[in-house]
Each structure stands twice: as C-alpha cells, then as structure tokens.
Image (cartoon, rainbow, N blue to C red):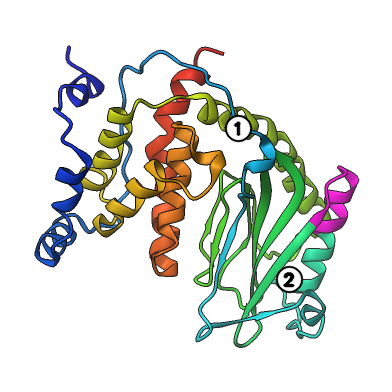
Amino acid sequence: METNLERTREITSPTDEDWLNEFDSENNQAEFNSEFESNGEFDPVFEDEPEFQQEVLPPVSSVPPVHGTLLSNARKTQRITRAELKQIETPPATGTFQPVPHAKLIDCLEESLSYRHISIVHGEYAVSLDGMKLFSLLELNAEFEGVRFAIGLRNSNDKSMRIGMVAGLRVLICDNMSLSGDFKPLLAKHTKGFDLTESVSIGVDRIQRGFDPLQRAIRVKRYRKLPDDEARVTIYRAFMEERFPVKLMKSVHNNYFEPKYEAFESRSVWSLENAFTESFKELLPIKQYEVTAKLGKFLHPFVSFVEGRQ
C-alpha cells in the first residue's frame, strides 16, 4: 500500500525560486488565504519514516534561549510587577467559591518548585483591567542543551475560569486566558474545599516528571537530519495541506535555509521547528497562539517513530 511519505517523495521538487516566487503576488496570496484559512485541528499521519540519522551538534553555547511567550493586549490587560500583584484585592469567598489571591498562587508555586531545587529566573505578569484575572509566564532554571523550560499559569477570581498551568519548552499564554504547552500538570476549580498547596505540589511533581520525555524529544529533533528536499516538502505540506498562514511560507523557508543563528544551521527537525516559530512572531497574538499549538502536532511524526524504538 502506498504511504503518505512515499507519495510525498514522488513529488518533483522545483527550485526554491520557482515555488517561492509563486506566492509573492498579492492576488495569489489572497487566493490561498481564502481557500486555506481555518482554525480547525489536524492530525497528520506518516505511516513510514526514513531511517534515523545522526549528525554532529553545534556547541550548546551557540543555541539561543528558547522558552515561553506571554501575549498581552494592552486594551484588555495590563502588565504589572510581582510586587504589584500583592496590591490587588481578592473578592470574599462564598459558600461554593474560594478565590485565590494572585500573589499567593505565585508564592505557593515558587515554594513548591524550591523543594525540587527548581527556581524561577524570570517572570512576566499581566492582569485583566479589573484585576480579577491573572496570566503569567515563569521561566525556570531548568535547562537542557540551551533550552530553558517555562511554566504558563492562569488564575481567575470572577468564576470565569479554573486555575490552569502548562509547562514545557514552548509555552504560550494569551490574554484570552488560553494556555499552550507540552503538557498540562494542573487544572483545578475554585471550590470551597480546594487545597492550593496540595494541588500546586501535585502539579509541580508532574512538571518534574515531564522533563525527561521533553529532553528526549529535543535530542531526537536535534539529531534527526532532514535532506533539503524533504524539508522543502514538509514546509509545503504545512501551508498547502495543514492550513498554516500561507503568507509565512517564504519566511519559514528563509529562516530554515538561511538561519539567523549559527546553532540552527544544522539541517534538522529542531532547526525546522525553530524556523516556524521564528516566523510565527510576525502574526498577531491570537493567531500566533493557534499556530504554535498546532506546530507540535504537525512535527510529532518525526519524533514518534524514534520514540517507538526505545
């Protein structure tokens, strides 16, 4: 039976100029955006994968830090300092709802992390204009091959959302309170019997256990070499089949084949992933959140076939 990957390999790859210049005209851009614009989920399937190949990695010191992103719209939220969190009033508890002070949530998380010898090295905080909602990005001292792990955190004291936490190497938290990360260690309601310390402690335990599989995934992506034609076809599939914003196609291509960082000159899945995320910075916050969340699923087949052999 012919597989998706076999069909892909039969495509005759045009030159870079041929297939990139096609999208330079505004008419073509509008046509493709109209046809493929969608917020739907997708789950690409690669039935067969090429043999896993290794290559010499660049020095870790040349890898730019990779962590999370906090997307804040000044019209809806305001960025504040951690000290200013303590000045925000918390509404009184009711018979069924137990609000959690924003500052107390951050303090509790920091304390729980310290018991595992993990610390917060940088924090960003934003709140809704009425102070009832918090969303925060916390970068950790936990690093692997130049990648710094991060935590995304949200809290709501107006009964609109549960406490949520995500963690990973690519974490996004948006001012619409959406969270995206490699895994979600905590999602809890503000119920009367809610135990903040216990819930946060369980979440941190899950974060720590999640570091190992993330490190393996990073290592696989950095060692998984991509022939140039396979990289071109993968970029093509992302935009033509999987509905990424077509206007970024040329930007992704340039970021991959002409990278800004020496560490990404290696033609690997890791470099391709970073080419995408670098290009996503050109998008508005909500769209950037959406496509970043999709990217991991799109590139997962490159990692999963190796994970299955372990």
Give the crowd class for mark 2: few <14, some 14-19, many >=20 residues within 10 Å: some
Q: Is residue 145 visible?
A: no
Range covered by the magenta-colored residues: 109-120
Left or right: 231, with 260 as reference point: left
Which mark lies nearer to you, 1 or 2?
Answer: 1
User: Toward which corner of the image does residue 226 lie, by quadrant?
Assistant: top left
Where residue 58 is drawn, which disc sits there? 1
Q: Compared to 259, does 78 lie above or below?
A: below
Q: Amino acid at mark 2?
A: Gln
Which image quadrant: the N terminus? top left
Residue 185 within the magenta-colored segment of the rendering: no
Q: Which residue bears the numbered disc 2?
A: 98
Question: What SS does tag 2 mark?
Answer: loop
Q: Is residue 168 above or below residue 278?
A: above
The answer to whether 242 appears left or right of 2 in the picture is right
Reply above or below: 1 against 32.
Answer: above
Q: Nearer the viewer, residue 138 or 256?
A: 256
Task: Please state the total of marks drawn on the protein image.
Answer: 2
Q: Say which of 233 and 20 sits in front.
A: 20
Identify the residue at horizontal 72%, vertical 77% (top origin).
94
The residue located at (20%, 26%) in the rendering is 8
Among the two numbered marks 1 and 2 on one chain, the one whose residue lies closer to the N terminus: 1
Residue 215: x and y, percent?
64, 32
